[in-house]
Amino acid sequence: MEKIGFIGTGVMGSSMIRHLLNAGYAVHVYNRTKSRADAVIAEGAKWCDTPGDVTAQSDIVITMVGYPTDVEETYFGETGIFSEADDHHILVDMTTSTPTLAEKIYAFGKERGIRALDAPVSGGDKGARNGTLTTMVGGDEEAFDAAKEVLSVFSSKVMLQGPAGSGQHTKMANQIMVAGTMTGMTELLVYSKAAGLDLERVIEQVGSGSAANWSLTNYAPRILKEDYSAGFFVKHFVKDLKIALDEADKMGIDLPATRQAALLYEQLAGKGFADDGTQALVKLWWGE
Amino acid sequence: MEKIGFIGTGVMGSSMIRHLLNAGYAVHVYNRTKSRADAVIAEGAKWCDTPGDVTAQSDIVITMVGYPTDVEETYFGETGIFSEADDHHILVDMTTSTPTLAEKIYAFGKERGIRALDAPVSGGDKGARNGTLTTMVGGDEEAFDAAKEVLSVFSSKVMLQGPAGSGQHTKMANQIMVAGTMTGMTELLVYSKAAGLDLERVIEQVGSGSAANWSLTNYAPRILKEDYSAGFFVKHFVKDLKIALDEADKMGIDLPATRQAALLYEQLAGKGFADDGTQALVKLWWGE
């Protein structure tokens, strides 16, 4: 049974680590803020002082940190993963990060015989808790095959999407789609409330036809209960949409609807709601 | 068993009439272009020369025409529905039209003891064919109760959403949501193709997680087959979004994502794709 290293014990990471421990894996962990690893340590994970130390104790090293800059530091920092990695390791970055950085990690590893995958997820806190994440993987088939069983411990759908960077690109495609369902769902509620409709009835009926979507089913009821707690943070969605639009720019394509969504979420973050869940977008209308 | 009048024998209307005939109802029909009623006449519907004549032969009169101006003419024209309607009739406009016109028809009827409902649908040609339309109703409860059985002949979900105009408002809410799923789905495909991803794999995986929605499941595969035939016409979506934005303006609310979607669909119609299906939006990127 492979020994697992896990770097990043936030909301997502902690749930994923729990599934690994329950499946019988030994898990060594590191987190920038140590106190946030206490819960999983109490459940059997072993603490290490640096990402390099985690790597030295593991066969498969998973990273689930915040921003691309954190990923960069975690892999390439002085006591980072690459300071200890060798050709028996598989490194799996599950942070939503840039395709460019995924390719850089892959290439740096390849030169040294170290296998690397980019494997961001969708499904949010709930998917992590239930072990039903959607895991989108980029990299070599051999590394994918070797890591798949471990990733499946907390995922219900793991797919190799293509070469290094393809996992991140697929996640960007996912976020572009979600930008559409979140803005549509929000404006639906704004319109319906202004028109004096019964929002629960509207959600029930609209959610059952050709407008049906996951955001409407899962987030609209939370909004009616004024529950804006984060399944997925506004600040992280802002990051994701910025990456998607930067990548689109590089590829010379314009995505006006995604651009509009990014603008709205940036406004929302700017108004102090960066730590709310993405369903808080409606506060741009109802928050005043 | 009520005698049904049905005005408008287009793609949607013809399928709905067929379901009524199969359920054993007598159906009198009128259509501006008579030849487009030939098919349902051959199946047992009876032709009338004017909307007024249809009304004189019927208990419940259903209208499913193109634009609000057509609705106006059908109800208020010289040989229109109101020229023959009396207090035993129930008038049901199933055209997607303006809430304002729905209220006008309701009020005009009420003064004369004539019951009227607005009852636009979602589900498109496929829903009409399969008898699984989602029918959103505005008007009085008594009239709704009296018409519900007939509407259920071709609908899988019929709901009273509120007073006159509420059916149309709910349909606008539905279209606002669809604007989000259609633009999101389109930009997802545009991005994924530019990034060199395998579109079928992306659709399979993204469609199973938190980005899941009806448009992605139903339209994306058609796009991959380059099938741009109309389940729902671009020109009708342009009309619907214009109504939604006009209503939003009247209510003093701004819907930037819906506005962006309307702009894209107007561009598409302007480029000669008005008679394509709404999934043709991707032609703004791939059509050149």
Image: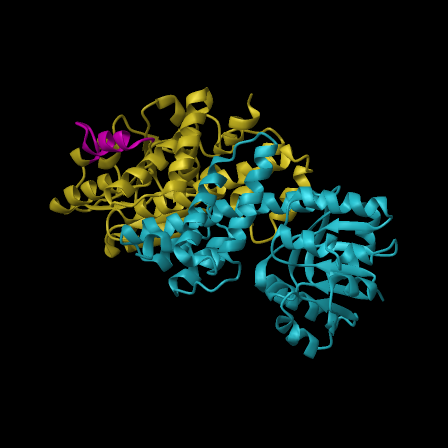
Chain colours: A yellow, B cyan
The magenta segment: A66-81
Q: Is residue B155 above or below residue B171?
A: below
Q: In the rendered view, does B207 fall on the left or right side of B160?
A: left
Residue A208 visible at all: yes
Q: Quadrant of residue A8?
A: top left
Question: Which residue is most to the bottom?
Answer: B42
Q: Is residue B25 above or below residue B69?
A: below
Residue B153 visible at all: no
Question: Which residue is most to the left?
Answer: A111
Report the front residue among B255 and A282: B255
Report the front residue among A137 and B132: B132
Q: Is residue B62 magenta?
A: no
Q: In the rendered view, does A269 fall on the left or right side of B178?
A: left
| Residue A105 percent location from the top left of the image | 20, 41
| Residue A73 percent location from the top left of the image | 23, 29
| Residue B35 percent location from the top left of the image | 62, 73
- Image quadrant holding the C terminus of chain A, namely top right
The rendered magenta stretch, by its main secondary structure, is classed as helix
Q: Is residue A112 above or below residue A83?
A: below
- Residue at image position (16%, 43%) is A109
Report the front residue among A228 and A121: A228
